[in-house]
Amino acid sequence: MRTPIIAGNWKLNKTISEAAALTTALKASVANVSDVEIIVAPPFTALAAVNEVIADSNIRLSAQDVYSEDSGAFTGEVSAPMLKDVGCEYVIIGHSERRQYFGETNESVNQKVKAALAHDLKPIICVGEQLEERETGQTEVIIEDHVTGGIAGLSAAELLSCVIAYEPVWAIGTGKTATPAQAQEVHSFIRELLTKTYSADVASQLCIQYGGSVKPENASELMSQPDVDGALVGGASLEAESFAQIVKFG
Ligand code: 13P
């Protein structure tokens, strides 16, 4: 019912030529895939080059962040209309690294989500608890806070243009993947939350990705969970071979 979405978040990696080469190799490896939505999220500087490589392919373009204003005196920022102009269909918002290092809050995430939606960009909204929060039993409180804060004020139709990515911070770049059961528990919690705030029908349509040390070896088991609808992949998306293997998890 829900099409799986596999997205590669390249973070602060790849020059323009490296990005084009990676995308060219990926495009060939996944050319036959039609049952999965495939997304790459290069750094801003490589978006235009990657967009050229993926023209007429089954790969979609995402940015890694967006600013909430469309234009003006905001040195260093990039706006939703600019991302649309360069070929983006998606934008990652509220990644834990932005929350941790760049002061991103639920409020700024929510403003960015609304700015993206206003320009027909699909937000991939990241939520996730830190290790200490998990160990002290606060996982659900944190997830509820991130989800409700990030999507505050959205209509059902707007919510359904979004993707939610559950990324436990302790699993990002650590090689420590959440177990399929741990992922499923949080994904189903998110879906229950959305059932309460929207409806069972809306909640059942929303794509919820898992992120945090997803590799070719663990992708299929994670994705076999009923509420895990895809993956947001960091390290393993930096090579065409490993990302293609994850895309072909089934
Ligand atoms: P890793 O796959 O490198 O753990 O990164 C996950 C992530 O943060 C994707 O957004």
Image (cartoon, rainbow, N blue to C red):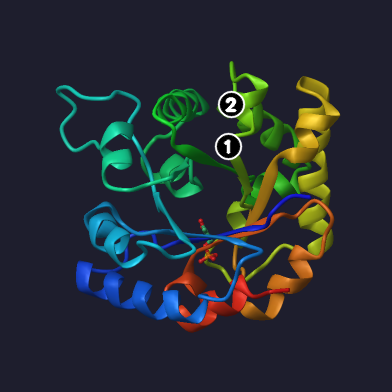
- Residue under the point 70% across and 75% down: 218
Above or below 238: residue 2: above
Question: Residue 155's quadrant in the figure?
Answer: top right
Residue 239 visible in the picture: no
Name the outermost residue toward the front.
56
| Residue 98: x %, y % from top left | 42, 44
**Viewer-side residue, 101 vs 240:** 240
- Residue under the point 49% across and 39% down: 122
Would you say 76 lies left or right of 197 here?
Answer: left
| Residue 67: x %, y % from top left | 32, 32
Q: Which mark is residue 158?
A: 2
The amino acid type, in three-letter code, at marker 1 is Cys
Instruction: Give the labeled residue for mark 1.
Output: 162
- Residue under the point 32% across and 48% down: 87
**Label 1 neighbourhood size at 10 Å, few (<14), some (14-19), many (20+)?**
many
- Residue under the point 33% across and 33% down: 80
